[in-house]
Image (cartoon, rainbow, N blue to C red):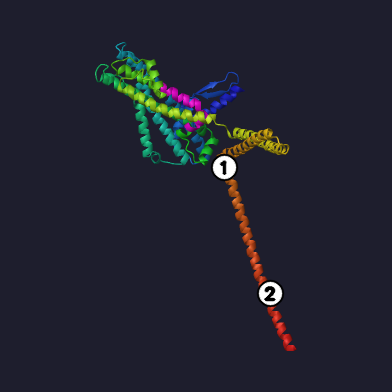
Amino acid sequence: MTFEMDTHKEMKDLHSCEARTPLLAKDTKTIKNPKTGKSSRMGCSPCFAKLSELCSILTSDVVSNGQGKANTAKLLTNMRRRINDVAVCLGLIGIFLMIWDMEYFMRKSDGDGSHIPSLILRICISGTTLLLLCILIFYHIVDIKLYMVKYGIQSFQVVLDGKRKIMLAVELFVCLLHVPPGIDYLSGNASHEGSAIVIILSGCMFFRIFLVCRALTLHSKFNSETSNKSLTGFGKISTDFPFVFKCLLLDYPMVMIFGLFVMVLFIASFFMHACETCLSEANTLNYLDALWVVVITFLTVGYGDVTPKSVCGRTVSVLSGVIGVIITVYIIAIVAQNMELSRSQKRATNFLTKIKLNKDVKNSAASVIQNAWLIHKSKIYWTPRKMKIYQAKYFESVRVMQTAKNDIDELMTASIDMFDLHSMLEMQNDWINDMEQKQQEVDIKMAKIGESLLKLHEKLDNVQTVTTNLAKRQAAFV
């Protein structure tokens, strides 16, 4: 039964492949199941089917049907995410090979080591760079097609505007920067000029980390789930990397800050060690000393026991200090935010504090009454020594009561946060609206009363006129 289901599924894949690629349908073979005796045609793998389907989507026109448009957009979104994952892997492999090559290069600068391993590694770096450029071009092709499908655009020239062209050119240029084979021998055998070029190009390879940022954006919950896409679409929120990074800082603050700290620490110490090894004449800063200098500069302490001598090392030190200040500000903000009580915790502590202060007010008020009665009693029986004691207790109780009342007022003032203030403003606005509505109702009733009074006045005038006429007739009759 399972084999029949698999055979039926393979037949569906086969027919879909034949519909998309009719030239390949002739090359399929027929196999026979020994148990059931049924035959099935094989020869179209699912991966090749998906690839042919993607190619047909990229080369076909934009679908106007709603269901087909949604399926096409989903397929292109998943494919774009996978292509970027491949680009991230190639970029990180290139960075790893660059670090390995720099270790051989620094040994060669010290006169210890051969250039053959470095040459092999740079050839591998060039190969991964070319593959990365091809993957990036393919990524942007899928991205443009996805944009066309989403907004129903038929021509890619409308999507490929100047801003997108500049972004594509900048990405390709950044990923193109690497250390090609033999670049350090253009200015002489391992000279300072060649070493500086190698270090600069190796440092530029770390700009490929932007692919990791793009991967975080594409794999975030705002770009992977349909519900979150709808929410961000209704809220007109741009789910780009700054927004995703802020959300990650909000959700995982210590993990993100620690990751940035370790990444900056590793990159800065590695390049400081490379600069001091290849460009400094003293050549006394090993990797541990470079790590120590970066940490001390990062934390804005700066003991000065170990200092970089080359211009490149000092530049790295300055940049690590600036980045350290920024990350230190973030750490202070996150620690302060985590130490702050939540609204429910604030309400609980304020409630308990208010209960204690109310008890202090009641106890001090009772003590005031008690001491006042004892002072009056001591005056009657004329005991001056006890009266002074009771007076001191009386004034102390008054002071405690006034202090507790002031603390209650300060607590009520401090317990009003932004949410409570917003609620109070809403209640005040509702109250004002109710008052305005009641005022309008009162004005309408007063207008009706005025109209009734006018009608009554007219009737009274009519009554007076009738009474006058009757009086005249009666006088004439008499």
Q: Residues within 10 Å of mark 1 (few under 14, many from 20)?
A: few
Closer to the camera, 395 or 401?
395
In the picture of the structure, the residue carrying the numbered disc 2 is 460
Q: Is residue 254 magenta?
A: yes
Which secondary structure, mark 2? helix
Q: Is residue 275 magenta?
A: no
Q: Position of residue 39 (x, y in %)?
A: 56, 23
Vertical order, 457 against 180 (above or below): below
In the picture of the structure, the residue carrying the numbered disc 1 is 421
Can residue 104 be seen at all in this image of the molecule?
A: yes
Which secondary structure, mark 1? helix
Image check: 263 left or right of 433? left
Image point (47%, 39%), residue name: 150
Q: Amino acid at mark 2?
A: Leu
Marks 1,2: beta carbons within 8 A? no
Tell me the quadrant of the picture where the N terminus can be found. Answer: top right
Image point (55%, 36%), residue name: 227
- Tell me the magenta residue range: 245-265
Work out which residue is located at the far left of the displayed protein and give it.
188
For marks 1 and 2 on the same chain, the one whose residue lies earlier in the sequence: 1
Q: Position of residue 339 (x, y in %)?
A: 54, 29
Q: Quadrant of residue 136 in the image?
A: top left
Q: Amino acid at mark 1?
A: Leu
Q: Quadrant of residue 159 in the image?
A: top left
Image point (38%, 25%), residue name: 320
Vertical order, 140 against 151 (above or below): above
